[in-house]
Amino acid sequence: MFKKIKGSNSIGIDLGTANTLVYVKGEGIVLSEPSVVAVDSTTREVLAIGEEAKRMLGRTPNSIVAIRPLRDGVIADFDIVEKMIKFFIRKVVPYKWVSPRVVIGIPAGITEVEKRAVRESAQQAGIKEVYLIEESLAAAIGANMPIYEASGNMIVDIGGGTIEISVISLGSMVKTNTIRIGGDEFDNSIIQYIKKVHNLVIGERTAEEIKITIGNAYPSKESKKMEVKGRDAGNGLPRTLIIDSEEIREAIKKELEEIRNAIVETLEQTPPELSADIIERGIVLAGGGALLKGLPDFISKETNVPVIVADNPLTCAVLGAGRYLDELAKIKQRKF
Ligand code: ADP
Ligand code: MG
């Protein structure tokens, strides 16, 4: 989805591992597309970007590969990331536009060299003023957390390729831990489980659909069932299978355990005063993975800390990036 914008001076971009979003002050979210680039595997020529590239996935000759250049929260291929950033900006920002300011949300773990590449790509797309912000900080702003106060706030951003667990106080990051698993890893584990236990081969899209439809991280009365279509691993013929929430929970057990461990570890590394605040206010979940049913209950039970899902988990990072400069101006005014 995208729409050309007429003119504004503040733009937020969320460069996610799975989805890229663009927010424009006064216009709302003007672009939301998968962070996918389709490339010719021999010539490395870029054939499609975003929605169109994702549609090509699994439906194209072997010579075309779909790349998710930010998949692990680091930039694996600079050239491709640059093309993707330029493409998305040019898609919504008119060519000759009076000095818009752009704030780009980036993963906490990226290096100075990677940051420069992101900044330069935006500049090449015609943006003069480019600011970078840690994605978690942007998500916390978008989730309306009181991050500028002298108190502890914990946000767990569960994206497609990574999970970022951050403690924020006085407007900056006190502690961040990134784990290289995210929503995609859940899908992979579902594929492997169904293959191993039911001898049925399913694709990534089906696995994601199963996760969203019947996935549940915490035992509940409303166990759901779903019919799954796939290919028999033995005879190669199409077959259907009925699967339920309990089995899916079993399939994603390892990922849930890893999320739990990473949160506990981060809490252990947090200064005691700040953890006291977190225990009182609760941990906030953001990112698409926060929508997994039962996840708040699971994390809360495992950590003994209340857990809240952000109002708009898929869009809070881009909203926060878009609001960042205004907020900074307000803070500066407050200080004398
Ligand atoms: P990123 O910021 O890394 O681009 P997103 O925040 O857009 O990632 O989240 C994408 C992930 O969220 C995907 O793995 C997707 O499967 C997952 N997701 C989206 N909606 C749901 C849902 N309702 N239940 C569980 N997972 C979901
Ligand atoms: Mg994200």
Image (cartoon, grey):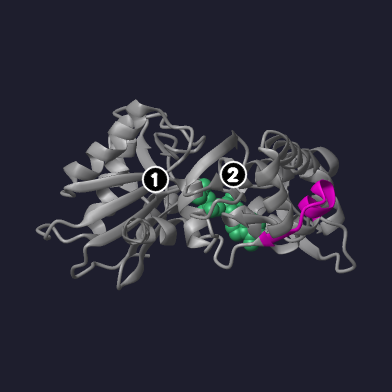
Q: Is residue 246 above or below residue 64?
A: below
Which element type, helix, strand or loop, lies under badge 1? Answer: strand
State which tag comes first along the sequence, 1 or 2: 1
Question: Is 216 on the left or on the right of 86, as rendered?
Answer: right
Name the residue beneath numbered marker 2: 167
Q: Is residue 127 left or right of residue 286?
A: left
Label 1 sits on residue: 133
Residue drawn where x is 35% and y is 48% of the image:
104
Specify the segment rendered in magenta: 298-308
Furthest-bottom residue in this view: 26
In the picture, which quadrant includes the C terminus? bottom left
Q: Is residue 193 left or right of residue 288?
A: right
Amino acid carrying mark 1 in the image? Ile
Residue 228 lies, in percent from the top left, at 74, 57
Q: Amino acid at mark 2?
A: Val
- Using the image as rendered, state which of residue 81 and residue 111 is in the foreground: 111
Going 21% across and 60% down the picture, which residue do you hit? 93
